[in-house]
Image: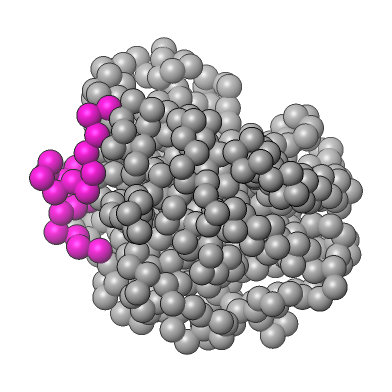
Amino acid sequence: MDHLWTRRFAIKSGAAVVANAGLRGAAAFAQTPDLTSFDPAGGRPKVADRRFQSAVVEETITETSRKIGDPALALLFANCFPNTLDTTVRPGTFEGRPDTAVITGDIAAMWLRDSSAQVWPYLPLAKKDPALRALLEGVIRRQTRCLLIDTYANAFMADLNAPPLSWSTKDLTTMKQGVGERKYELDSICYPIRLAHGYWKQTGDIKPFDAAWKQAMERVVQTMQEQQRKQADGPYKFQRTSPISTETLPAEGYGNPVKPVGLIASGFRPSDDACIFPFLVPSNLFAVTSLRQMAELANSVLHDAALANRAEALASEVEAALKQYAVVPTTQGTIWAYEVDGFGSQLLMDDANVPSLLGLPYLASSPDKALYARTRAFVWSERNPWFFKGSAGEGIGGPHEGRPMIWPMSQIVYALTSNNDAETHRSLAMLLASAAGTNFIHESYNKDDIKKFTRPWFAWANTLFGELVLKVAAERPQLLR
């Protein structure tokens, strides 16, 4: 299949059917992983077919499942939490060190964002399991290799010697060996920092932070500074021939113009959809947090004051620009815009993919809690053009799958960022229903029909759901009883 957007997965009358869909909404089978070991309707793979096994993970599944009163919810957790380890990791070695590729599920490529998020919930368990710790070290080292290939790429092939994803072969951009897709997304170069910092905090291990990692971080900072576009548009441009407008960038591939005010431009959103205004606010807020994490690692592990100071200075500049240009008035008070251009144009919406405005407390920091609360109320309402409410549930979607598709990821993030028992309980109920009897979380589903869903094998959503259940079990176990 040459175009990923030509396929969508849904379940109807117990059988898989195909319909039209948005990009990355389903797999191009010519480049999918081996599906024989994973049946999305049949639960976890057989033990012998699992890609990686951890006794600590299995113990966590057992202990947590005992706290869940609803057997269906317990089964959903038991299937979803280990899904990344069961099906998507590709452990190996490179130059005598751990090297781990992590595919997204039904697409045989490694997104920097997805792979970071997919393994994130396992970090607290790594100190108890040396093999799991080595696997995670391998993810950091593989991401370092990817960043050194191209900081403007969002996805890389699991086999770095393989050809790119089929839909990328005719893109008008500079493709390099190992790159799967070259959509520049600011969040894609932030997520590896978050993973590295979290790994260090959880394990104390500094082995991954070698000369190559330092070089990768220097290139990340360089890329962010280039995309402040103070002197010019920078070296990156991207065009794709597609009937879907969000698959390509206007203005000869550079995107719509921006006024250089200190913010960092992004070509595409975390959904892989093109930005309308290139200053993507949640990704800039994420960058502020990530740059400060980089500065901490540079000071404490690399003992490199120059890199630390460079990262901290950029973080402070972006933070100040966000306060000045990304906070906008509404009839119900000021909120964060989703995208701005520095000239005064602003887009008020939110997308389900993370970083999002909804997810600010999860990934980044909103310096004003009241500002976040107002923004949260806006995005989880019909004032947000991509919020949908129907007979099957409510939540945020986005242009990637279009109307009227709710993304369970938004419901997970809504619960992860909530201290309200009723909100969390309702989210869990909607998530359980949205699995549509498959015992896995999907990419999106129709607001009025849970059986019309996309992507039966989407490891990021599965593992994120597992993370939510673990958080609720630790902090508010009564909600699971």
Q: Of residues 178 and 253, which is closer to you in this image?
A: 178
**Residue 15: image x %, image y %?**
18, 58
In this rendering, the answer to whether 115 lies above or below 53 is below
Q: Is residue 406 left or right of residue 61?
A: right
Q: Which quadrant of the view contains residue 129?
A: top left
Residue 298 is covered by the magenta coloring: no
Q: Of residues 378 and 316, which is closer to you in this image?
A: 316
Residue 388 visible, this orientation: no
Furthest toward the top, the residue is 478
Residue 323 visible, this orientation: yes
Which residue appears at 27% of the width and 19% of the height?
63
Residue 35 is covered by the magenta coloring: yes
Which residue appears at 77% of the width and 75% of the height?
233
In this rendering, the answer to whether 22 lies above or below 142 is below
Q: Of residues 117 and 208, which is closer to you in this image?
A: 208
Q: Tell me the quarter of the image containing the N terminus.
A: bottom left
Q: Is residue 395 left or right of residue 79?
A: right
Q: How many marks?
A: 0
**Residue 398: image x %, image y %?**
55, 57
In this rendering, the answer to whether 129 lies above or below 190 is above
